[in-house]
């Protein structure tokens, strides 16, 4: 048996091992700890590339934890899908790849960014636990297992948001996130209990195979949508994001972006792969579209008036989540109508999924540049910054690349994903495209504000000592910059190899089910 | 890898834009080269014209602060922004309250 078979499990096992060994590695000194942080993150990223290649070449990968078959056959002949499985289709593999890249960039950046602080053994362990939770969420094919990984990611992020525990704001942000996140987790658990009570199964494919929409299923759906939409920062449940993203160390914020995408993944896995055509009415798709439009507009409106750079970017994150909800919501709307799916639904889904990778790398890079400014100038308040392009030319260059890309300026990758969303949503209702376009203009305005106030203008006497950040931080930012430039220069390749397989996997509910329960339960 | 991205309604050719970018950059550099050749860096030619007033020593005195950026936009939408900032109270009770309200509204829409 080839070791490639174990790739899904290794994707989770490697960062989990990283977390438990981190305190031991830290005892060997700073260099050993940093090597462990970057080495394990790099290995996870390499594994994610291999897994993605394997899934594209061989189709959906199924991995049963602790057994040969996912089901247990009783002497009576009855078969129960009780074992935990990892089900990795092209959408899961795509998400794992995106998340691993963000985790690697954040890890490299953190080696220098965090060097002034103590407690880095705990930081490293929590960082890997957060990575494990994120990867587990996107790779699992089991609802309860999804809940467990969601909780692992949540608990690790509470610790990381409050890492600078001498700052009352950090403790407050972590506490608020913990309260709303715990309530969200309870909703997820209750929803899973509803489905388990009805079908005696928590395997996603097994549940999807037998699901018939009744009251219990509807209640479960509501709880899952609300909890996962909150976790990815959807208006009006987004209010934890500005607090948490602002107070977390910059490398962690980069990873938190990927974790929020894992929740978005969960939302769409539930809607497309578990409920799918059973959704019936257009209520759920339209709810997601409306939440998307509200997120886009309210998020960017709040971003424009912020003067704290990470807070501005956090509100901007809320706005970008709206684009993905809009694109994938339109895809969900067209799911039961093959003609609509062919006309505009699939294009909208491609736009939404392409924007997902664009958002993760661009926003991750923007948060890292904000961290670089804080590291070099000692302030995140834009009123205190100015003229730093002279002192920090590389950071400035990478900020401009990321800001232009996420604002959707041609020829950057953000423009391609937004173009797909604009044109496809126009076919549903032109007002949706208009809202998306206005949001894009305001996005550009908010980043022009950051660029003008932090990087341009006359040099300030207080900032005369500022110099470019250390090589480790530049390298972390460079990883994401290279990905952005690659996506910009090769949009057709990106769409054909990354986005389209993921979109096809998401709409193919029958394929998702048959990969596991092809022979019946 | 090198073909156009088709959106179903049109297409996108990134290389046309990159060529345009290089042409525009070339034009910018050409216009710049048409400038005065007797310019000397570090001389009085570098001095900023500040309405015949003395230029302040510290740049922070002449920079528009971030909190004043887009003042007109925010002023014109004052009512909208008052509503939005009122919603963002920072109170955990409100955070949870919005979740409960969304769950209730969605439950009504889905169950009925």
Image (cartoon, coloured by chain):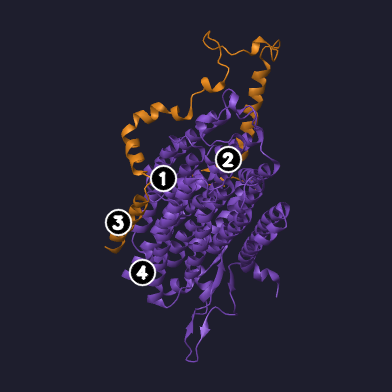
- Tint of chain A: purple
Marks 3 and 2, how far apart at CA = 37 Å
Q: Which numbered marker is on residue B105?
A: 3
Query: Residue A337, can we see it?
Result: no
Image quadrant occupied by the C terminus of chain B: bottom left
Classify mark 3: helix, strand or loop: helix
Q: Pointer 2: what residue? A: A402
Direction from residue A190 to residue A203 in the image, left or right:
right
Q: Residues within 10 Å of mark 1 (few under 14, many from 20)?
A: some
Badge 2 and badge 1 in a common chain: yes
- Tint of chain B: orange
Q: Residue at x 65, y 62 (%)?
A: A18
Marks 2 and 1, how far apart at CA = 26 Å
Q: Do the CB atoms of the residues marked 2 and 1 lie less than 8 Å apart?
A: no
Marks 1 and 3, how far apart at CA = 27 Å
Q: Earlier in the sequence, mark 1 or mark 4?
A: 4
Q: Could you tell me residue B55's position as x and y percent?
A: 56, 13
């Amino acid at each position: 048996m080839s070791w490639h078979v174990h790739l899904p499990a290794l994707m989770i096992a490697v960062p989990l091992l990283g977390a438990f060994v981190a305190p031991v590695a830290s005892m060997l000194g700073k260099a050993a700890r940093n090597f462990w942080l970057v080495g394990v993150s790099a290995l996870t990223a390499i594994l994610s590339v291999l897994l993605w290649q394997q899934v594209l070449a061989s189709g959906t990968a199924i991995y049963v934890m602790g057994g040969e078959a996912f089901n247990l056959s009783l002497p009576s002949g009855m078969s129960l899908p009780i074992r935990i499985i990892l089900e990795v289709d092209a959408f899961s593999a795509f998400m794992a790849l995106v998340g691993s890249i963000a985790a690697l960039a954040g890890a490299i950046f953190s080696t220098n960014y965090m060097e002034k602080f103590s407690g880095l053994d705990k930081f490293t362990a929590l960082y890997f636990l957060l990575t494990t939770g994120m990867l587990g969420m996107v790779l699992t094919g089991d609802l309860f297992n999804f809940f467990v990984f969601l909780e692992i990611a949540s608990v690790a992020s509470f610790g990381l948001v409050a890492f600078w525990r001498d700052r009352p704001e950090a403790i407050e942000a972590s506490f608020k996130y913990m309260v709303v996140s715990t309530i969200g987790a309870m909703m997820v658990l209750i929803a899973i209990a509803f489905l388990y009570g009805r079908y005696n199964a928590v395997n996603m494919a097994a549940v999807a195979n037998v699901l018939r929409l009744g009251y219990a299923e509807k209640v479960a759906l509501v709880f899952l949508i609300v909890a996962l939409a909150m976790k990815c920062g959807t208006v009006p449940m987004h209010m934890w994001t500005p607090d948490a993203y602002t107070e977390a160390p910059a490398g962690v914020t980069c990873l938190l972006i990927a974790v929020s995408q894992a929740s978005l993944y969960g939302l769409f896995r539930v809607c497309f792969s578990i409920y799918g055509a059973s959704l019936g009415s257009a209520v759920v798709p339209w709810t997601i579209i409306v939440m998307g439009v509200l997120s886009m507009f309210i998020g960017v409106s709040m971003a424009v008036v912020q003067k704290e750079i990470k807070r501005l970017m956090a509100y901007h994150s809320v706005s970008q989540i709206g684009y993905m909800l809009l694109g994938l919501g339109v895809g969900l709307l067209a799911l039961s109508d093959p003609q609509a799916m062919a006309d505009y639904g699939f294009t909208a889904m491609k736009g939404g999924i392409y924007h997902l990778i664009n958002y993760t790398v661009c926003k991750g890079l923007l948060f890292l540049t904000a961290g670089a400014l804080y590291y070099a100038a000692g302030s995140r308040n834009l009123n205190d910054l100015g003229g730093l392009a002279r002192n920090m030319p590389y950071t400035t260059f990478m900020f401009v690349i990321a800001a232009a890309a996420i604002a959707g300026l041609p020829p950057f990758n953000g423009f391609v994903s937004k173009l797909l969303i604009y044109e496809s949503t126009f076919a549903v209702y032109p007002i949706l495209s208009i809202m998306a376009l206005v949001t894009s203009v305001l996005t550009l305005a908010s980043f022009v504000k950051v660029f003008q106030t932090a990087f341009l203008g006359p040099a300030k006497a207080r900032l005369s000592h500022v110099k470019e950040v250390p090589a480790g931080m530049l390298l972390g930012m460079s990883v994401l910059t290279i990905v952005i430039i690659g996506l910009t220069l090769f949009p057709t390749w990106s769409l054909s190899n990354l986005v389209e397989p993921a979109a096809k996997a998401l709409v193919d509910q029958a394929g998702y089910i048959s990969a596991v329960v092809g022979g019946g339960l | 890898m090198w073909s156009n991205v088709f959106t179903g309604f049109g297409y996108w050719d990134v290389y046309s834009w990159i060529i345009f970018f290089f042409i525009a950059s070339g034009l910018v550099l050409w216009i710049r080269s048409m400038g005065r050749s007797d310019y000397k860096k570090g001389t009085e030619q570098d001095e900023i014209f500040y309405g015949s007033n003395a230029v302040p020593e510290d740049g922070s005195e002449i920079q528009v602060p971030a909190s004043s950026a887009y003042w007109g936009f925010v002023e014109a939408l004052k009512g909208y922004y008052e509503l939005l900032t009122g919603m963002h109270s920072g109170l955990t009770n409100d955070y949870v309250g919005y979740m409960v309200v969304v769950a209730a509204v969605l439950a009504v829409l889905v169950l009925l």
